[in-house]
Amino acid sequence: MHMPQMLPITKLQRNYSAIVRQLPAGPVFLSQHAKPVAVVLAPADYERLASAEVELHRLQRMATADQDFAEMRNGKYTEA
């Protein structure tokens, strides 16, 4: 895992290409008044995060379905 890169947002305003050059080393956190306000990601990092979110939702649906089936097996269901 990469060490987080934290830069003041003014650096983005003055020299965005320097930020873009840092993206291969991981996300760049932009700060304003010493507080994080934004994150700049490389496209591959964004795609990885988006895919992980989709997979998380799929696993949550599967876990809910497993719980529902377990309740049905234990007689906890109603007929429509």
Image (spheres, rainbow, N blue to C red):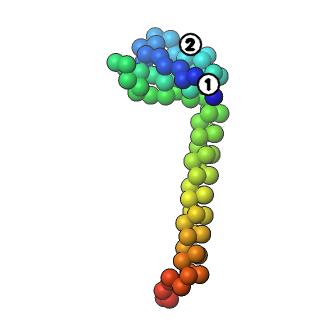
Amino acid identity at mark 1: His
Above/below status of 24 relative to 62: above
In the foreground, 27 or 74: 74
75 up-or-down from 26: above or below: below
Which residue sits furthest top? Answer: 14
The residue furthest bottom is 79
Q: Is 47 rendered above or below residue 28?
A: below
Q: Which mark is residue 2?
A: 1
Residue 13 at least partly seen: no
Q: Residues within 10 Å of mark 1 (few under 14, many from 20)?
A: few
- The residue drawn where x is 41% and y is 21% is 31
Q: Residue, x 53% and y 85% (percent of image)?
A: 75
Of the pair 51 and 6, the residue shown nearer to us: 6
* Residue at figure coordinates x 59%, y 36% from the top left: 46
Image: 76 above or below 41:
below
At 58% from the left and 63% from the top, the residue drawn is: 63
Query: Hey, which residue is sitting farthest left in the picture?
Result: 33
Q: Position of residue 15 (x, y in %)?
A: 50, 11
Q: Earlier in the sequence, mark 1 or mark 2?
A: 1
Mark 2 packing: few (<14 Cα in 10 Å), some, or many (20+)?
Answer: few
Task: Kindly give the residue lying farthest to the front in the view shown.
Answer: 74
Q: Looking at the figure, which quarter contains the N terminus?
A: top right
Q: Position of residue 8 (x, y in %)?
A: 43, 16
> What's the mark number on residue 18?
2
Distance from the alpha carbon under mark 1 to that under mark 2: 18 Å
SS class of the residue under badge 1?
Answer: loop
Q: Is residue 80 left or right of residue 73?
A: left
- Relative placement, left or right, of 9 versus 3 is left
Look at the numbered disc 2 and give the secondary structure of its residue.
helix
Residue 62 is situated, as x and y percent measured from the top left of the image, at 60, 64
Q: Amino acid at mark 2?
A: Ala
- Residue 22 horizontal/vertical position (percent): 60, 18
